[in-house]
Structure formats: structure tokens, C-alpha cells
Image (cartoon, coloured by chain):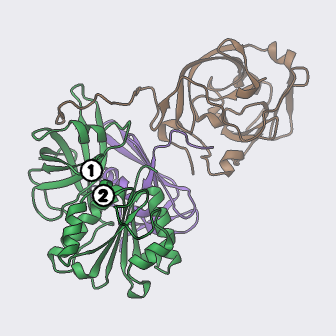
Chain colours: A brown, B purple, C green
Amino acid sequence: MAVVSRGFGARRRESDPRLPPGQYLTDDFPVLSAGPTPRIEQDEWRFAVRTEGGQTASWTWDEFMALPIEDVHTDIHCVTRWSKLETSWRGVSVDTLLDSVDTDAEYAMAHSYGGYTTNVPLEDLRGGKAWVAFEFEGEPLDPEHGGPARLLVPHLYFWKSAKWVRGLTLMPDDEPGFWEQNGYNMHGDPWTEERYW
Amino acid sequence: MRADNAASIVDGNAAAGMLWDVFGADATTLIGVCAGCGDAAPLAGAVVEIDESAAIVRCRACTHTLFTVLRDGDGVRMVLGMLQEIVRR
Amino acid sequence: MTVGGWRPGRVVEAVAATPSARILRVQVPGWPGNDAGQHVDIRLTAEDGYQAVRSYSIGSYGTSETIELAVDEIPEGEVSPYLVEDVQPGDELEVKGPLGGYFVWRPGGEAPVQLIAGGSGIVPLMAMVRAATDVGAAGSVRLLYSVRTPRDAIYRDELARRGDDGGVAVTWRYTREAPAGWADRVGRLDEAAIRSAAWDPGREPIVYVCGPTGFVEHVADALVALGHPPARIRTERFGGA
């Protein structure tokens, strides 16, 4: 048993075992963006999955809403060290979207309205780990937070949950997206602090 | 992206304790060679973000992550990144 | 007995050093001794098992079982307010060390030594001042010490006394407020101030710079611009501005 220091501990920082290393709790939902907020109307919105072989599956907003929709309750972790616990979303599982194509690819590049990209291994998008989400805390997702729809991959740092997502391009090899080209990790696992590379 | 809640940004001297937990010896005088840019420098001079749970150790010349040391219960893990070579002079 | 490298230590003395800093003397049975410039990790454990670890430079050197730390209080901090305001002689904590083989001074070198301290960065450099003086090398050591105001200088009286006694030459730099009658400039250390206080690069000094990260980077850049080779500049950065 470690030596106890009399009277120590009164000023401890609030901590939570659900937090990955180096993260701090927030009740806010900070907005961090590399550029201006795109404004996309539902009737112009499209989502597409393109395979390495050129096959494409795409959905309009109405077609998308006809797919199976799931409730998601999860924690989210930003590389700038804030974490938000027990957030709720509604969205379409990426598994559902990938069921529409045939692929041997192991990686995906998420593309967003406005030009943002981020790369994610398919292994991290499959198996109930990722969604294209359009509702947050019971309300339609705000453009500031990535609405009409954003990718949601909560087990990786939140820059991988691409805002204003418009599609996934499947790739045989991993390639860096926007932040990854700027020094952020290709994978982004918060539990091993894969922040940079 | 800016780190609002950044842990202290210091240097490899501050990671001496965590590195002692890994190696059982002082590692800060070891020269680390970065696979990203080839820079060879004492680990004491690396850019380090450190807090209770981990130290992220980055090459001062090119900023890529050399390695990360993580507390894991009572133990430690050192996850290698761009650290390619260690030299003791 | 050390468990995971942690030795028990007992605070034997706690003395105010500045309005925000305190000198603590900690007895560590079995202490193996330390070189000037090394540091320790201090671990504090609360009654409920909550723990925190912080690094502090050692102001003393040598084989004594009682080591000297100087802790500057960081407002809103978790550990430094406890060490500066709450801890009392008789209290216990845990010590890992000595740590650090890079930012150290050992006797026997021929080159002159330039020490540059920002705020609480003086602590490891004070150990170097004391060690060099004790082996008769004070004449080859210069100290440039940058603080906000005279009241913020840890070890102020000791440094003044050593300087008066022909020991290590100290150049003071005040960044916000100087003592009455101060004739030199007040403000952040710049190249000109470093040039005038420090050993000329032609003397090939070993330079030790310690303080907050921003201070160290600024001073190291200035030293290189003045012609000091990077390989002869050793740095230790503390967290903070």
C-alpha cells in the first residue's frame, strides 16, 4: 500500500474511469472546424459508397431515411482532449450501407461536402461500430455539428467522425485524409493515445 | 486543431520517471533516431506532452511521434511510433 | 525498500521562499545521492487511494539523505497548492529518483558554464551553483536569472551572498518590476541582455537553460543566434507559459 499523504486530495481534478488517457470531461459540445460550415439542403443531399472496383451505391435523403435506423448511445473523444460521455444519436449503420456493395477493400476515405476527408480502416467501420448519423440528442443534427449527416465512429478520436459526410470511397491501401496529412494519426485510437504520427 | 486542454508541453526530461518504469534506468541521455526525418537527438530534448496517464514523445525536428508511454494499471506500455534507432554514446 | 521505484520520504522542513513558493526539505532513507540538476518524481496518495505524480527539480546535490525541493504554486493546480500551503514537517510522501542524466552538471569539465534560469527554473541551476562552488569552480560559472520581480526570486539572499563573497557571478533580469534604483532595462530577456551577461561563445561554454517552455525556447533561439552551438546548450522545460 502506497504511503498516504495527510490531507492530500481535496483539490483533485474530476476524473472518470471511462475517460481514455489524457482526456477531460466536458458538458459542452465544442465546435472545431477547419473551414466554413457547408449548408446542404435535404433535397440536394446524396450519400454514396464507391468501391475500389468502381461500383457505386447511392441514396437520396428520402431513400436514406427508408433504411433501417438505429439509436446510438456512446461516448465521444476529441483529440484536443475533451470527452463527452453518454451522447445519443440516430443514424444508419455503415454495415447497412456496405451491404449494398461488394468489396475486398480494407480502407475507406470519408468525403465531406466542403472537401474535408478522413481515412478509416474498414475494420473500424464494420461490426456495429460506425453510423451515418443525422440526429443528435433527439434533434436534427445542426450544421455546426456536421448536419445534415455526419459519419459517427465513436471508438476513434472524433476527427474521424467526418462532418457533412457525403460518401465513402473504399481503398485497397490506407491513405491519409486531411488531418492525417497534417500530422494526425492514421488510426486514431484514444485508448492508446494515437493522436499524432 | 488546437489543444484547448493540452497537457503541459515540456521535454524529454519530464518523461524520465515514466521511462524509468519501462527500462529500469535513465533513458533521457539515449539518442533517438527518427524514422520520419532522420534527426538524431537525446530523448531529453524531445517534445513531450505529459499528464497522469501518458507521455507522448515527439521528434523536435519534424514533430512526428517517436513513441508513447502509457500507464496501464500498475504497469507501463511503450508504444513505438517513428523511433527507429536508439544509440548510447 | 523501494516498491516500483518509490521510496517513502518525510518532510522535515517547510520554509516560505517567495509569496508563491516554498522550500521543502525531505528526508528519504536510503537516498542514493544525486548529481546537480537531477529531479525527482513525487507521488501523493489520498486516503481513498487517489494518486497524483509530479516532477520537481532537486536544489541540493550530493549524498545527504535529506533532499531540497522548491515548489512554486500553480493557481488551480492539484499538487503544488498542497505542497506550498498544506504540507507540514512530519508529513509523508513518496519519492522516485534521482531522475535525469542529461540536464546534470558534474565537476571536472574545462569549459566555462553559463546558467540561465526563468522563474522556478532556478532550482536545478542552484544545485549546480552550490556544487561548482564547493569544488572551487565558482569562477567558471555565471548565472543569468530572470524573474518577474525581486520578491519572486527563489534563493535570492543566498545568491546575493555568494556573489558578494566572490562566488558565482549573478546577473539579474526583472521582467515586470525591478528593485528601487535599478539602472538596467526591465522586460523580457533578449539577445542583447544575454550577450552582455553570458560567456562569449568564443569561450565555448556549456549552457544550461531551465524554466517555462516558452522561456526556454526563446532563450535557446537567442543563444543560437548569438553563436552558441546547439550541441552545447542543454535545456529543461517546465510546464506553463
Name the side, left or right, on which A139 lies relative to A193.
right
Numbered disc 1: secondary structure = loop
Which one is earlier in the sequence, the residue at label 2 or at label 1? 1
Name which residue lies at 16% across and 55% down.
C67
- Name the residue carrying label 2: C153
Return the x and y of residue C145 as percentages of the image width and height: 35, 65
Tell me the chain of label 1: C
Tell me the chain of label 2: C
Q: Check the image and report above or below for A158 versus C119.
A: above
Name which residue lies at 51% across and 53% down.
B81
Q: Is residue C30 visible?
A: yes
Q: Check the image and report above or below for C191 versus B13.
A: below
Of the pair C24 and C97, the residue shown nearer to us: C24
Q: Badge 1, how many Cα within 10 Å: few under 14, some, many 20+?
A: some
Of the pair A90 and C222, the residue shown nearer to us: C222
Quarter holding the N terminus of chain A is: top left
Which label number is shown at residue C18?
1
Return the x and y of residue A132 as percentages of the image width and height: 72, 24
Name the side, left or right, on which A58 lies relative to B86.
right
Q: Is residue A106 visible?
A: no
Return the x and y of residue A60 as percentages of the image width and height: 88, 21
Whether the residues at callouts 2 and 1 have beta carbons within 8 Å, the answer is yes
Name the side, left or right, on which B83 lies relative to B76.
right
Measure how far apart labels 2 and 1 are at the Cα level. Answer: 7 Å
Residue type pointed to by label 2 = Ala
Of the pair C117 and A72, the residue shown nearer to us: C117
